[in-house]
Image (cartoon, coloured by chain):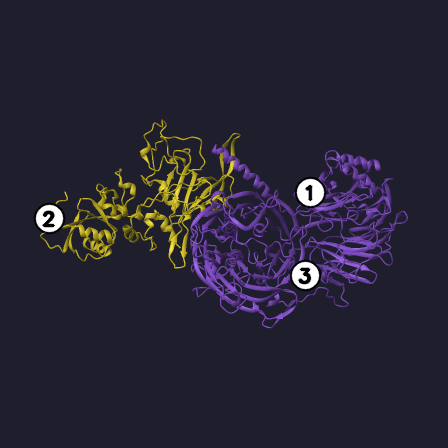
Chain colours: A yellow, B purple
Amino acid sequence: MNKHHRVPSNRTLSSVEVKSKFGAEFRRFSLDRSKPGRFDEFYGLLQHVHRIPNVDLLVGYADVHGDLLPINNNDNYHKAISVASPLLRLFLQRKEEADYSAFGTDSLTRPKKTVLAAVLLRPDANRKKPPVIISLPRDFRPVSSIIDVDILPETHRRVRLYKHGQEKPLGFYIRDGSSVRVTPQGLEKVPGIFISRMVPGGLAESTGLLAVNDEVLEVNGIEVQGKSLDQVTDMMIANSHNLIVTVKPANQRNNIIRSSGGGGGGGAASGSSGRSSDSGASFYGYFTPGAAIATTPAHIIQNFHPEELESDEDDEDLVIEADGEALPIPRAASASCSMPSLPRYEPHLNLRSTANGALASSTGSLSTVSTPDRGLEGRSLEEDGTLITL
Amino acid sequence: MKRFRRHGQESHRDRIKQELYGFNKTVEHGFPHQPSALVFSPSLQLLAIGTRSGAIKLYGAPGVEFMGLHDENAAVTQVHFLPQQVDLVTLLDDNSLHMWTLRAHHGVSELLETGRFTLTGPPGAPPSVTRVTAVLTHSSGDMLFLGTEGGHVFVVEVPGFRELEERNISLENVTNSLPEDYGGRRSLEHVESLQENPVNPRQVLIGYGRGIMVIWDLERHSAVKHIPATQQLESVWWTEDGGHVLSSHSDGSYCRWMVAGEGTQSEPEKSEVPYGHFPCKAISKIIQLPTEQGPPFLFLSGGMPRASYGDRHCISVIHSKTHVALDFTSRIIDFFVIRDGPDHTGDPSALVVLVEEELVVIDLQTEGWPVIQTPYLVPLHCSAITCSHHVSAIPLKMWERVLSAGALQNTHYSKKPWPITGGQNLSPDAPQRDLLLTGHEDGTVRFWDASGVCLYPMYKLSTAGVFLTDAEPNDNMNQCTEGEWPPFRKVGCFDPYSDDPRLGVQKIHLCKYSGYLTVAGTAGQILVLELNDEAAEQTVEATVADLLQGQEGFRWKGHTRLEVREEPVTFPPGFQPFALVQCQPPAVVTALTLHSEWKLVTFGTSHGFGLYDYQQKSNVLVRCTLNPSDQLAMEGPLSRVKSIKKSLRQSFRRIRRSRVSLRKHHVNSALLSLANARLEAELAEMELAPVQRKIEARSSDDSFTGLVRTLYFADTFLSDSSHHTPSLWAGTNGGSVFAYQLRLPPVERRSEDPVSAHPAKEIQLMHRAPVVGIVVLDGHGSPLPEPLEVAHDLARSADMQGCHQLLVISEEQFKVFTLPKVSAKMKLKLTAIDGSRVRRVGVAWFGSSRSEDYGESGLTVLTNQGDLHVVSLPGVKLQVQYPCIRREDVSGIASCVFTKHGQGFYLISPSEFERFSLSARCVVEPRSLVEVPSQTPGTTLPRAQPDGPRVMEHALLNDESE
């Protein structure tokens, strides 16, 4: 399969022939191999030759192994040019219609490609796993997840919002209200805290997991019953970097329904199920080990493991020494003594130092502060992002 | 096994906690908020004050204090001591009567409520029949006469509250006895006053609202005499010899009536309107007391000419040719007169007046009737309290210097000792001398002796003299223009009106060893003062600190800087200002710290912080912390308030205008009603809209992130672990900590070589919560000692061998970092767990109550929920938690100040500090004993018995003794 690329081309080595496909149309042109230029120039050229100046494109190319790999920055563009022999085959997609799953399906386990894989993929995707999603890093950052489905009553929902220092506001309001509880004395009206408003375009609204009039039961594992609106507000803000709200949705029709038999075998349905990532939370007295999830909301990212992003983020205080270099505060070898200690997070982006440049330039939200050993320390992408907002 | 052992350790720790910590609210300092009743017991020498919130407070000799609170949330309208007993009766607004007693228990008296009673009328009677308006405690000590709104007098046996129906004096009994010609059978109205004949306990005078007074014989159960006053009755006084009755009336007149003889006396012996001719206000109380030689004293409350002086609060004292109208600062609640002699029947010695905001005692036996300084009930709020600062364990030398400076200020007070002497103060002498400093709105700082139960005023410092203010200090105290009528004399010190709000004191820091004091105020002024025993005339040099440092786009809309007097000012002995820093923009100073060893003062506002060298009188460092996008901080503190006010005003104007224009143009009523309906709907919507809270992470763009919340000096390892250097730490509202390394010249060159500061570190807390405290812990994990503390051999010097740690306290969590490399070591989260936030924090040392030599350092913390916590050091673990202040009481929480020994103070009203203790060892609380007067030895016997049947026994005994 990869024999023919060693065959020297009879054409001149200094130019690369490009065949670009957009929809059903092809365009052919050539580039100077020694002076490929920058990615944005190339992107403009593509828009020009296809006469689609205002269409957002996802650019992919077929590498020597026949895998479809993305071109979205200078580095992988240069890589694509350098490995193209003789022909660089491009596949353009409209961004909004892009089929991410088409990218690089088969060949990612090969060691050669780990550079690109590291930029684009989660490390667990290195293993041969069913559909791996590849896209620009900023496109697949998780925004929310439903967690602890197996230990919560079906009527409740535990939602985690990932703030990650992004600009998007959490975007919701809470209010006082009253709810009805079943007590040994019968039904009783008790005060409760409810979501009162969603900010359009906010994180909470965009997840679709929270809605107006949902009753807030817990904040990061702490029950809110008996607490004032201001207290709950302060708790949520104190946890805003990693907010986990347990709600009783006002609309109970979209609940996750467990198979009544509980026969098992459901574990594969969702990566976010079956893991109790929050210890110390209130348990509801039962536990269904093999709970299968029949319906998962579409925006839940498959194979996403919540504990990867789990971190006690406010340990990441920033210290600027006198010489002006900003350093995140390393965690000294001692545990926090806050009540329910959240599980330690694992590095989920196994960045090698070579990947840093690509990473930094590919994600606009990241700015320049990066220390050489950061990848080795296992800082996660998102945390670094928040750090630099100073 | 392991679990078992751990359990053992925990219980051991629990025991230690019990020995270290204990929560008590111990004593209330200051003047009770909204007093509503006053009474004095000559036999006990105790005065009692009831308040509108239902509290009852008893005071005797300094240190003798008792407090009780009625369960009912009703105002105390009357308080009466039972003659010659330790019991007192209170009447509340809800018409209930309560019996209180001082019971000795383990050698200390306690104020306890022993019974309650509500008068029940005949079935079907209107409530006014039993609505009590006058109370007389009969000299026999076992009867209460209750006059009511309906005009009846009920007789009740005390202390058991048994109605003696057969003795009641009903309105019918009285009206039947009236002569036919009196007033055409009009209603007599309510019972205004009940008085016992001082020489004949069988006779009681009943004064009715309409004016008529009836002297009633209790044994014959019939009227003896009628006194037909025609004006609305205000009060009655039966002279001591029993020969005359004085009545005061609502038209500002008083009359003297002869008692001798029976039947009706048609004309008063004397009738006078003291401030007459023009209509006068009522004389609400009249007292006449004889003197051994010479004319009697006459005391009249009120009676001022309505038009010209109707707003004055006056008590007129007339003695022989002397006539003074004492002009008080607030409404008069009540007054009484203390008399000389063993039986308290001699010459009047002091007039005690309770006005709404203070207690004033006038010495009637010294020429000029000077005021006697009160040892308690001091009006803390004579100008509103704006901040407070506590300094523990003042060295004796310093203490004496402050005292002598204060003594010079108090020369206008009477030299006579405090005339109220009841009870014995049994509390041990204070273990140390503590000072509480309060800053006030008028620019004064008051020094209080806070060592013991009495918060005693020591010294008052005024900072206003340094500045040019609109109002020149014109002390019109004791100013009396000749020939002025009424002959006013101003008394009292309550003065809530501040000449210039910019003078308000916001932060205070006193070094108890060196006598250096720094005071910072509302207009960004920072004064450095030095204690000087001599008066001095000096100019105060002002230095401007430009905190903006060229920050663009700034528009300060707040107040202007205070103008400094350029000519030398004479400062009396005491604390004398010698240096002044003025922040630009002149925003309120939010943090202030003094280091007397390094001779540095650091200060912060919402714009930044600065470091000032008061030896060389120069700025060392100015740092701007302002976020350029923070418009609110840029414009100044007033803009936001203004804008709300403005928008409210605008919307009201708009509403009014729309209504006016509608009316003006004769628009048909349909349109008008439509507009009104829309307005109503808007209002309804405004009311119905639920309170909601936005959930949003803090960001660097929030308002006032640059506001400096805390400043701290430390000698620690800032840049490397082998050399410790002086350092300055600043924490902001946005969760930033700035650390500067300071270079101080050697001592011998201190006044020539400059001090320099170099930025060393900046920490941005991820959670961005405001930093409220910074503490450096030494190698042993103890907080660094205060400056000069070690030099005075009062503290162990800090351990410089082990690693230092930095404790940063934000509103949300406590976090320990290593030094010099700032890495997070451990933390305690507060807000994430229970939703409370740190409002106040202090470092305290807790001694064990069991063993003298064991103690621990800890943080005392007050949260926005009003809970007190103790957090251990250096482990930052929650030790104990006590609810202390209602969470709605924002000003109470904001006013809290901690001592270094686990006590604290907070304002329970604008005029009262509650003192509390978190320490099991260090508790200051009143311990006093009040004994039953010796005249009635019989009553002491049952007092010693246990609780239960005592009331009954007492009642029986009294019956027997009669």
Q: Would you say the residues marked 1 and 3 are in contact, meaning their CB atoms lie under 8 Å apart?
A: no
Label 3 Cα neighbours within 10 Å, binned few <14 / some 14-19 / many ≥20: some
Secondary structure of residue under mark 1? loop
Which label sits in the foreground, 1 or 3? Answer: 3
Side of A242 relative to B328 (left or right) = left
Hey, which quadrant is residue B204 in on the image? top right
Coordinates of residue A267 in the picture (x, y in percent): 33, 33
Q: Amino acid at mark 2?
A: Val
Q: Would you say the residues marked 3 and 2 are in contact, meaning their CB atoms lie under 8 Å apart?
A: no
Whichever of labels 1 and 3 marks the residue nearer the N terminus, that label is 1
In the displayed structure, would residue B516 be above or below residue B190?
A: below
Q: Chain of mark 1?
A: B
C-alpha gap between disc 3 and disc 2:
104 Å
Hey, which quadrant is residue B580 in on the image? bottom right
Which label sits in the foreground, 1 or 2? Answer: 2
Assign the C terminus of chain B to one quadrant of the image.
top right
Q: Name the residue: 84% across, 37% down.
A: B961
Q: Name the residue: 17% across, 57% down.
A: A34
Side of B402 relative to B877 (left or right) = right
C-alpha gap between disc 1 and disc 2:
107 Å
Q: Residue furthest right?
A: B261
User: Label 1: which residue?
Assistant: B94
Q: Chain of mark 2?
A: A
Coordinates of residue B924 in the picture (x, y in percent): 65, 48
User: Label 3: which residue?
Assistant: B406
Side of B585 relative to B245 (left or right) = left
Question: What mark, if any, has residue A7 been given in the picture?
Answer: 2
Tell me if residue B469 can be seen. Answer: no
Coordinates of residue B534 in the picture (x, y in percent): 66, 67
Q: Amino acid at mark 1?
A: Asp
